[in-house]
Amino acid sequence: MKRSSVNQKTLPSTTASTKEKTTISGRPVRLFYTPNDLPENLYQEKLSDPGEFPYTRGIHRTMYRGRLWTVRQFSGYGSAKETNRRFHFLLEQGQSGLSVAFDLPTLMGIDSDHPLAEGEVGKCGVAVDSLLDMERLFEEIDLQKVTTSMTINAPAAVLLAMYLVVAEKQKADFKQLGGTLQNDILKEYIAQKEWIYPPHPSMRLVIDTIEFCTHHLPRYNPISISGYHIREAGSTAGQELAFTLRNGIEYVEWCLKRGLDVDSFAPRLSFFFNAHNDFFEEIAKFRAARRLWAHIMRDRFNARNERSWKCRFHTQTAGCSLTAQQPLNNVIRTTIQALAGVLGGTNSLHTNAFDEALALPTERSARIALRTQQIIANESGVINTVDPLAGSYFVEALTNELEAECHKYFDRIDAMGGMVEAIEKGFPQREIQDAAYRYQKAVEEGEKVIVGVNTCQADEDEPIELLQIGEEVRERQRSELEGLRSRRDNHEVGKTLAALRETAKSSHNLMPSIIAAVRAYATLGEICSTLEEVFGRYEEPAL
Amino acid sequence: MSNKKIRVLIAKPGLDGHDRGAKVVARALRDAGMEVIYSGLRQSPEQIVQAAIQEDVDAIGLSILSGAHMHLFSRVIELLEQNKATDILIFGGGIIPDEDIPELKRMGVAQIFQPGAHTADIINFLNQHFAVPRESVRST
């Protein structure tokens, strides 16, 4: 399709200083800010030194001087073998941790030979049907040395079980295993919409994994409470922050109801935010996140361990900000966003590749994305001092505003009876939908400007090379599954699945039964459908 | 233009849950005076075609971001042919690369709206497409 425009507009000239300006989230911004915009005792009450409560300035005193953020590029496509090759490539290029993208059938808990998987196998990530694929995915990667983040939600417990059985085969010590399971089902109902079961049994699965990890994997993050997808679905910065932290509150409440001591699991809760284009608002969001979470854990839940108060988070630059038009411009957008993440004190970072509005990244675009982080880390000098924007009248005022906005949302959701109830009422979903529509209107009316889209258009884009994933992955996965089903001990598979069904009906932790089924090479689809027999399937209410 | 409103089914086939675009488009078409039915997530091509016929729509807009567009568009078109419902206009949007568009058009997809498209473009496209036949219907 030809992307052309009649009027080759240039950037709008500097508008009069009196014209109202807003952030990308629609928050009014004044011409300048002064000390009058901040409370008098700002430093004592709201900031403190880095590493001190409420951690507005960072969870560590030394921040990036002590340890750089983890450079963690999300990747996965095709078969486990292909993705394993990409992992080795990224590690050789200086990446410090792995992050697995699974394909849609895996995310939905179905096998590659399921009719609904047609056309989707290996497209958005790597296809994992059974332990066999997981073994190939981590071939010659020492799980005790490399930490891995797995972006998986509805079937997260099953993928964790597969990961643990691979670790077991590598003779790794569970106590040494690091890494992160996304495992955040609430934001699936709110934004990303990859659910299987209804909210209550899904929450039970999440709490089962947290409980299991608390007892057996002390260095592993069993959940990554994610605002990223909420923002991608079109929320504002304030909504992203509010709904994510309120989801965090919900998980803590459910863990407490399970009988867990708050300080036994809270230090391993981790978060995941989006870094969008509006530079200062994003930095303020990250700072507000830490302050809010510290108060929630100390004051609402009476956590005593300082580690429970610290909001550790991963950041990914905003996929939804990438344009299909003039795709190389996305390198610049990603750089600005990544810089906001770093100035906001992120603990881990993923930078998107410039071609991701069009396809999954090629090796070339993935390398540039990685280099973006390395240039910020090594050349810009921004890592030398902690929280360099502290004390900026503007940034501090924004941080305070975002904090206040979150409290308003918390009150509304508390009044509904909690986040599960709010989701069942469609509340966060509607708030996000309205914000997405407002933003689209603002773009179409030229109120919000996107270079290459509603200004500075080019007649013709330079063609770029795109990663193509063929249908042969599905064929290969199908024949692998066929082979597996005839080779494995099917009596043992049946026995473990029957035991899993019984555990699902009881109130016992599901992890041991899931691990047993995985060990017997039961497939992901078999395990998930066994649970579905007991739990049922979620239907979204009409909104 | 006749008074009869354009009826559109906005459908979300495939396994992905990215419904931001589909919902924005549905709302924009509704605001532009069209009657819009949104299918909800993860509809099979069979369900989509059945809904389109039952609801007697003029057009189906498919939103696909997972990379499965070649398979899903061709399946929907095949089913429309089987059901003798090829008068229903097919358009779509999502993460669909330039290279795939000629093939999709050959299959019978009337238009693809890529990332960055305005809802006004989609509204104009539908209004223009349906303007002529509607005039003639009224005059007979």
Image (cartoon, coloured by chain):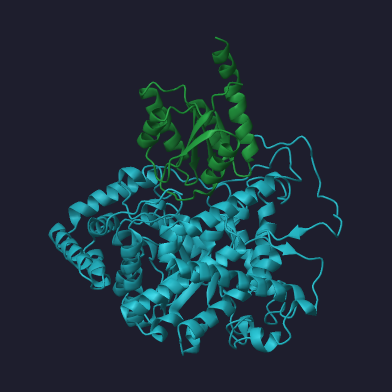
Chain colours: A cyan, B green
Residue A63 is situated, as x and y percent measured from the top left of the image, at 61, 82
Q: In this view, does A273 lie to the left or right of A143?
A: right
Front in this rendered view, residue A143 or A449:
A449
Residue A483 seen anywhere in this rendered image of the structure: yes
In the orientation shown, which residue stands out farthest toward the top?
Answer: B140
Q: How many marks?
A: 0
Image coordinates of residue A224 in percent, x first then y, are 46, 70
> Which residue does the image show at 61% across and 87% down from the upper left?
A61
| Residue closest to the eye, B90 or A442 | A442
Q: Which of A73 and A56 is in front in this view?
A: A56
Q: Is residue A180 above or below residue A106?
A: below
**Residue at x 72% of width, y 62% of height:** A28
Q: Quadrant of the N terminus of chain A?
A: top right
Which residue shows up at 40% across the image and 42% down it?
A119
What is the residue that sits farthest to the left in this orientation? A491
Q: Position of residue A485 (x, y in %)?
A: 21, 53
**Residue in the picture at 47% in, 84% down:** A308
Residue A130: x and y in percent read 29, 59
Question: Compared with residue A264, is residue B96 higher up or lower down, i.e. above or below?
Answer: above
Residue A22, quarter of picture:
bottom right
Examine the rendering and report whether any part of residue A95 can be seen.
Answer: no
For residue A116, which quarter of the picture? top left
